[in-house]
Each structure stands twice: as structure tokens, then as C-alpha cells.
Amino acid sequence: MKIAVLSDIHGNYIALEECINYALDKGIDTFLFLGDYLGELAYPQKTMKFLYSLKEKYQCWFIKGNKENYWLNYDQTWKENDSTTGALYYTYHNLTDIDMDFFHKLNDKEELSFNGLPSITICHGSPNRVNEKLLPDNENTFSIMDNNKAGYILCGHTHIQGVITHNQKVVWNAGSVGVPLHSNGKAQFLILSSTEDLTWKSEFVSLDYNVEKVIDDLHSSGLYNKAPGWSAVSEYLLRTGEISHGNVLARAMFLCREKTGQCNWPDVPEEYWKLAVKEMIPQTR
């Protein structure tokens, strides 16, 4: 048995399609999706329609990521034409009632069993919280693994592929389909395969895809204007796999506090975003 595990699509329908086609070519017809379906990139309905189509044709499981909690708990402070929240505003206002119903029905985690194979817990961040990171060589991670019933945990959220082993238990992080870190601009996901001795083995996959089309979409959709600093980070991250949105946001807030004495999310003036992007993103200097 083979299963494709995909996380953190973040609206990158082009990378998603590349990953799914690769899996289908391998004869895979079972898919686990670990949340954060939208959030950074343009034309969110293209991602959602693709996911709904997969759900109709194949065996799919979907769980909630932290981004889904954003849509379910819409914040009236989000603003259009704002680097901090413009992408959130844009995505939310492109959602349909069908999408909201889909998100409402998602669980934070699931425990799955397949054909007598060892059970697997699927989650976005950790089995405890969707926004908690399972990090290597971390005592909190080890404690979560010890207390988890299943011997295998599948997660995402960090956007970095990897494996953690502890006390004969395993965490596999599938990485990110849409905006992975340290990927050289490639889309990433995980394939699980059953073995003859009824256990699981993993294969981390990294794929080239049409990154420039995704960047073109940022501009043609108007999203680049609605969230300029955020989209500049997205463009660089898509091409290189380096520098996260969170790091640039943190720098913008630091610069704001240094100048004004305080800075509270989401009120980060554009001038500090411009300074942070110019400082941290090479091609924008």
C-alpha cells in the first residue's frame, strides 16, 4: 500500500497538481492532507476546486491547519492593501459558503489504521495543537511522542521535511507543497509505503514545477498590491526556498519598535515592511 501525504499547500494549486500527478503516476490513490490549504498565494478557488475534485475521485482524509482557524475566526482588523494582513483579507474574501462548511467539518487530528498496519496519527502542528511545532531534539516533542497512542505521527506546519525518532516512535514531517523552506524552490510531500513485515517506510519527494506561473499569478490577481511586503517574501521563497514570512514580519516589527517604542500585530506600518524586505530579500534591494 502507498499513501501520499501533503501539507501546507497555501494556495499553490500549480505545485499541488504537480505533486498529485506524480503520486497518481506511482499508482497512489490514497491521500492524506494535513491542513493549511490556502493563505499566501493567488486564486484560492483553484486550489479548493482541485481538492474537491480529488475528494470525489479518490480516498482522501483532510484535517485542519492553523490557517483554517484564521478563516473560521475572521478578524475585522484585517485590511486590504496591507503587508501584514492583506493576504489574509484577500483569501477570506475569495472563500465560498462551501469552503467554510468544509473547514468547519475538519478535525484537528485523526488516528488512522490501514489493513492491519500500525496506526498513524495525522495532525498539522502536533496532536495537541494545530499551531504547535514538532521540532527535532526537543523535549516537548519527545513528551508528545511518548504520550501519543499511535507509534507514528504525520505532521507539517514547519514547512521543513524531516524525521524524528524517539523510544521506537516516529514523527514524519511532510514539508510543504506550496511554500517549503530549504527546498531550492521545489514542491515537497511524503509517500508512505507498507512493508512486508507490516510496518511503514517513508520517501520524501521534491519536485520541480512552474514557479514563475505562481509568481505571475501574484501579480495578475492583484494580490501583490493588496499585500506588497508579504508577496515580496512569497516571491523570493517560491524561487529559493529560503527566508520565511514570519522572519521578515518579525524584523519589520523590530524596526517599528526600535523607531516608535512599540509595535503590535497587526498594526505594522508599511514603511517598516519596506525596510525589512529591502534588508532581507536580495533581489528587492
Image (tube, helix red, strand yellow):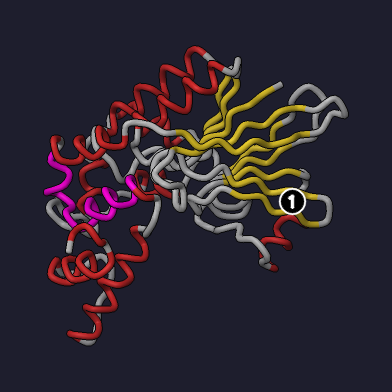
Q: Residue 268 is drawn in which quadrant?
A: bottom left
The structure residue drawn at horizontal position 43% and vertical position 40%, both measured from the top left corner, is 186
Q: Is residue 237 magenta?
A: yes
State which quarter of the image contains the N terminus. Answer: top right
Q: Is residue 155 above or below residue 220?
A: below
Depth check, front residue: 166 or 104: 166
**Residue 77: where, in percent of width, then height?**
21, 58
Q: Is residue 86 above or below residue 11?
A: below
Q: Which residue is mark 1?
A: 148
The residue sitting at the right extreme is 197
**Residue 90: where, in percent of width, then height?**
21, 43
Q: Is residue 262 magenta?
A: no
Q: Residue 58 is drawn in which quadrant?
A: top right
The structure residue drawn at horizontal position 34% and vertical position 26%, both measured from the top left corner, is 98
Depth check, front residue: 71 or 256: 256
Q: Is residue 100 left or right of residue 118?
A: left
**Residue 144: where, in percent of width, then height?**
70, 58
Depth check, front residue: 80 or 173: 173
Q: Is residue 211 left or right of residue 115?
A: left
Q: Is residue 114 above or below residue 72?
A: above
**Residue 200: where, in percent of width, then height?**
76, 34
State which quarter of the image contains the C terminus. Answer: bottom left
- For the residue marked with disc 1, what is the amino acid? Asn
Q: Is residue 188 above or below residue 58?
A: below
Q: Secondary structure at mark 1?
A: loop
Range shown magenta:
222-239
Is residue 77 in sight in this rendering? no
The structure residue drawn at horizontal position 17% and vertical position 43%, both measured from the top left corner, is 223
The residue sitting at the top extreme is 57
The structure residue drawn at horizontal position 73% and vertical position 43%, both measured from the top left corner, is 152
Q: Residues within 10 Å of mark 1 (few under 14, many from 20)?
A: some
Q: Is residue 108 left or right of residue 208?
A: right
